[in-house]
Amino acid sequence: MVGNFKQKVVFIGKGGVGKSTILSLMQGKEISERRDPTIGVAIEQVKLNNSEKITIWDMGGQERFQFMWEDFVKGAGLTVLITDSTEENINFTKGFYERFSRFKGSKVIAIANKQDLPGAINIQNVANRLGVKTYGMCAIDPAKRKEVQAILRQEISEI
């Protein structure tokens, strides 16, 4: 990708899994301990480096907004399924992915957030269960900023 290219990336996952926190991490914003749920959808531009920009659609994860997800995935180059690393959220994410596996034209990966918490299911297990390439993350760790940017840069470059 060169110059001012703007790639649409969609973050989808249940409420409270860390979608907005990952977005804030990528933007270099201070990570708040206060959780403010996304209402509907938040659309933000993120610079991955000096020349690459992407547009991230951060989907509200509450049940009342989930009906919109399939429509918002249309036209995405990359769909990122975000789950925390608990049994409940992995099962939800797997069910969603199976129900809406019509991500035509969109590459799909997963991020298993909250890997720092006790009892977190390891990445390989999450990947096996979801059936998509999965990365581990701890979105509240500012040291992970470059890592998450590199993940998206790499995945977008392979589209």
Image (cartoon, grey):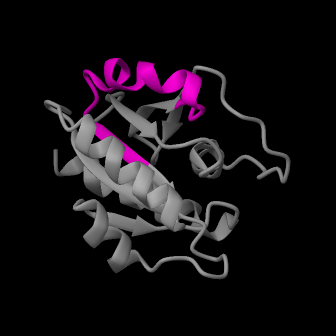
116 lies left or right of 94 = right
Q: Quadrant of residue 98?
A: top left
| Residue 123 on image: x %, y % | 40, 76
* Residue 154, placed above or below residue 129: above
Spot occupied by residue 100 in the image (x, y as percentages of width and height): 26, 34
- What span is colored magenta in the figure? 59-81
Residue 72 seen from this side? yes
Q: Residue 94 magenta-drawn?
A: no
At 44% from the left and 60% from the top, the residue drawn is 90
**Which residue does the image show at 58% across and 20% down from the upper left?**
40
Percent across and percent down for residue 79 are 32, 40
- The structure residue drawn at horizontal position 61% and vertical position 41%, both measured from the top left corner, is 15
State whether residue 42 appears in this view.
Answer: no
**3 vs 17: above or below:** above
16 or 148: nearer the viewer = 16
Magenta-drawn stretch contains 78: yes
Q: Position of residue 102 (x, y in %)?
A: 17, 32
38 sits left or right of 13 in the view: right
